[in-house]
Image (cartoon, rainbow, N blue to C red):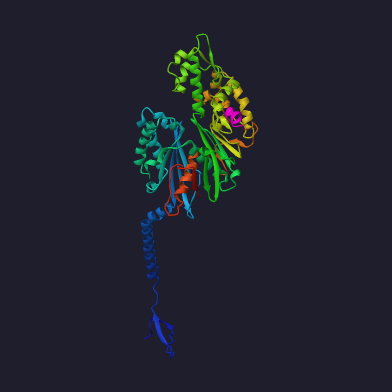
Amino acid sequence: MESEMDPLKVEILPDHQSSPYTFTKPKSNPKKSIILIIVASIVSFAITLGLLFVLAPVLLSGWTSSFRYSAVIDAGSSGSRIHVFRYWIKSGKPVFDFGAENYASLKLNPGLSAYADNPEEASVSVTELVEFAKGRIPKRSLKESDIMLMATAGMRLLDVNVQEQILEVTRRVLRSSGFKFQDEWARVISGSDEGIYAWVVANYAVGSLGSDPLQTTGIVELGGASAQVTFVSSENVPPEFSRTITYGNVSYTIYSHSFLHLGQNEAHQRLWESLHKSAANSTEDEIVTDPCTPKGYTYENNSQKHSSRILAEESRLTGSLQAFGNFSKCRSATFAMLQAGNENCPYKHCSIGSTYTPDLQGHFFATSNFYYTSTFFELHEKDWLAEMIPAGRRYCKEEWSKLKEKYPTTKEEYLLGYCFSTAYIISMLHDSLGFALNDGRIEFANKAGEKEIPLDWALGAFIVQTSREHTSDYSGKSRKMVGFMSNVAKFKV
């Protein structure tokens, strides 16, 4: 009988002979083969889905963990701003990107110093800032993400015991936030540190870190309670004004000083108080004029709203103090304020008061209130200092009621300050520090570089602290400090 099997012949040749063997394979059944293929495919697909379901969280977790997160709270005089950063490590070094995907910030008013009389209230704004940061950091990364709070001039103006009471409230919030936090990471930093941090982010933004020190960019910052001047100087700077930092293999000797009480808001406040005291000591028939406030402004209804520290006997002073905006007189008044104590200068040269300032070197960014005032008046970047004078003259002599009509969307407290700020800026930059009105070395800015990185000192603090965290000392231990603990700071990026 004929076999139903088709012969499949394979020859296996032993080493010593060639004897053929014959194997046979059954005929295939097409229907059964198709069913088997379908079943196998379904099973394979189900297994794959199951594996993906089980492994996906692990895989995604591994991908997400390549990012690291950090938060810095800039506790300034007028408000507190939290900066949230995402970065990653490449070849053992941190990589920073301050674009929208990797950086976010939120500012809340008022500043922490406003809670001097009731420190516990500071917890509300700090908690809100923390929640903003937590919303931008994956939960699984939170406990590995550090958070720091650095307070500046507003807090420096307070007594140390009041500072500590407010800081302790903020520490309590930060301890329970879920972030990585140590008590010493919430502190009041020095004005010099603030200037250095601003210098770092400015030169990081323009790509000059690691280059010739004399090719770097200086910073002149006009804050609310203090002003900072920071730049590389080739002069023999007195040690109390000198800081040295190392970036890569390049060392920079930097002049840095913070002029406490000479921030825009604090200086305007001091001028107001001086005028009110003069009015208080004047006779009934004598009128004391305020050259830095537009005509028609009435102190009785407004000064307590705009300036909580004006003398309590406001109504008694109203009759003898009169707003009479005059740019030239305001400029003279602010210059006198900046030069107070200059006759006691113990150094070769003092530009502001009795504080040493070396000759200006290099290019400069004028930031914070320099920028805000310049953009309000729509000044051109090239000749902005020269344009500031006529802009101030026009503004100061205008009636208060007309200014409110002309700028209906601008807060009155800002409108009230622009006559003062134009005169103060000229007095500080031109009359005191010596920048020429057409000096191309100085430009107002709040961002810099091709990537338009914000010129906030907190970004510089983040760069320094994160770079230190990932730089090992000779013992192999990671170094991390908050603020500069000495006049010499070394870090690599």
Across and down, in percent, residue 350 comes to: 57, 31
- Residue 223 in view of the camera: no
Task: Determine if the magenta segment contains residue 427.
Answer: yes
Q: Quadrant of residue 451?
A: top right
Up/down of 314 relative to 12, above or below: above
Q: Main secondary structure of the magenta part?
A: helix
Return the residue found at the far front: 346
- Up the image or down, 275 lies above or below 166; here it is above
- Count of all numbered marks drawn on residues in the image: 0
46 w.r.t. 128: above or below = below
Query: For this rendering, which residue is in front, 212 or 2?
Result: 212
Q: Residue furthest bottom?
A: 17
Image quadrant of residue 130? top left
Q: Position of residue 432 (x, y in %)?
A: 59, 29
User: What residue is rendered at 35% in x and 31% in y?
Assistant: 120
Say whether residue 64 is left or right of residue 200. left
Residue extent of the magenta highlight: 425-434
Residue in view at x 38 percent, y 31 percent: 162
Q: Against 134, is 3 above or below?
A: below
Kindly give the residue lying farthest to the top in the view shown. 285
Asked if the stretch drawn in magenta spans residue 57, the answer is: no
Q: Is residue 184 visible?
A: yes
Query: Where is residue 407 shown, x and y percent of the image?
Result: 54, 24
Q: Quadrant of the N terminus?
A: bottom left
